Amino acid sequence: MSHSASHHTYDISLLMEQTRLLAADYRRSTGQALPVTAELARFDAIDKLNLKKLDGESGVDAVDVNGSNEKYLVKGRVIFKGGKARQKLGQLSLESGWEFLLMVIYDADYQPTQIFKVDRQIIEKEIADSPKDKRGSMTVAKYKAIGDLVWTSET
């Protein structure tokens, strides 16, 4: 049985929708978050921004094959109502060859609401300028401030 590419894509989209529902229900029921945001973020960034998924190159999640050939690292963050505003994005690997960070912001239902694109050089400058003990881990708000909004669910 060979599946056509479009059929496969449809299956994955459906699975991702089910994953969103499951993760939201799980958190509402238990107060705990399922670790699915990274996979959802990769899927959504690639889907919404029409990128190509990169499996081979470690530390690079996607590439823009429509001209620029920019290499992207993708991160996701779920923003829960009443959640801490100073949410951190976590450590970014600066060893790998990504050029831009794509930060996918989710609502409590694990639906993407915004995608920000942040230039690696700006990130590296921010990290270099920050106190030693705070290195490498910036807040979501900070990334929004230094990045560009490239997709929103409103549009």
Image (cartoon, helix red, strand yellow):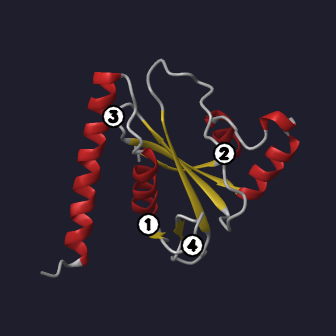
Residue type, numbered disc 1: Asn
Q: Amino acid at mark 3?
A: Asp
Give the residue number, with chain letter if any, for mark 1.
50
Q: Secondary structure at mark 1?
A: loop
Q: In this rendering, would 1 be left or right of 127? A: left
Q: CA distance from mark 2 to mark 4?
A: 19 Å
Local packing at callout 2 (Cα closer than 10 Å; few below 14, some 14-19, many 20+) is few
Q: Secondary structure at mark 3?
A: loop
Which class describes the residues within 10 Å of circle 4: few (<14), some (14-19), or many (20+)? few
Looking at the image, which is closer to me, 29 or 153? 29
Q: CA distance from mark 1 to mark 2?
A: 26 Å
Q: Secondary structure at mark 4?
A: loop
The alpha-carbon separation of the residues under discs 3 and 4 comes to: 31 Å
Q: Quadrant of residue 1?
A: bottom left
In the image, what residue occupies the spot 86% across and 35% down?
Answer: 131
Marks 4 and 2: in contact by CB < 8 Å?
no
Q: Nearer the viewer, mark 4 or mark 1?
A: 4
- Asked whether 66 or 96 is in front, the reply is 96
Spatial CA distance of label 2 from label 3 is: 25 Å
Query: Residue placed farthest to the bottom in the image?
Result: 2
Residue that numbered label 2 is attached to: 91
Image spot of residue 14 (x, y percent): 22, 55
* Crowd class of label 1 (few under 14; some 14 to 19; many from 20; radius 10 Å): some
Q: Which residue is mark 4?
A: 57
Q: Residue beneath label 3, please? A: 109
Indicate the position of residue 2 as horizontal and vertical percent values.
16, 82
Q: Amino acid at mark 2?
A: Gln
- Residue in the picture at 19% in, 71% down: 7
Please tell me whether mark 3 or mark 1 is closer to you in this view: 3
Neighbour class for label 3 at 10 Å: few (<14), some, many (≥20)?
Answer: some
User: Up-down: is 77 above or below 8?
Assistant: above
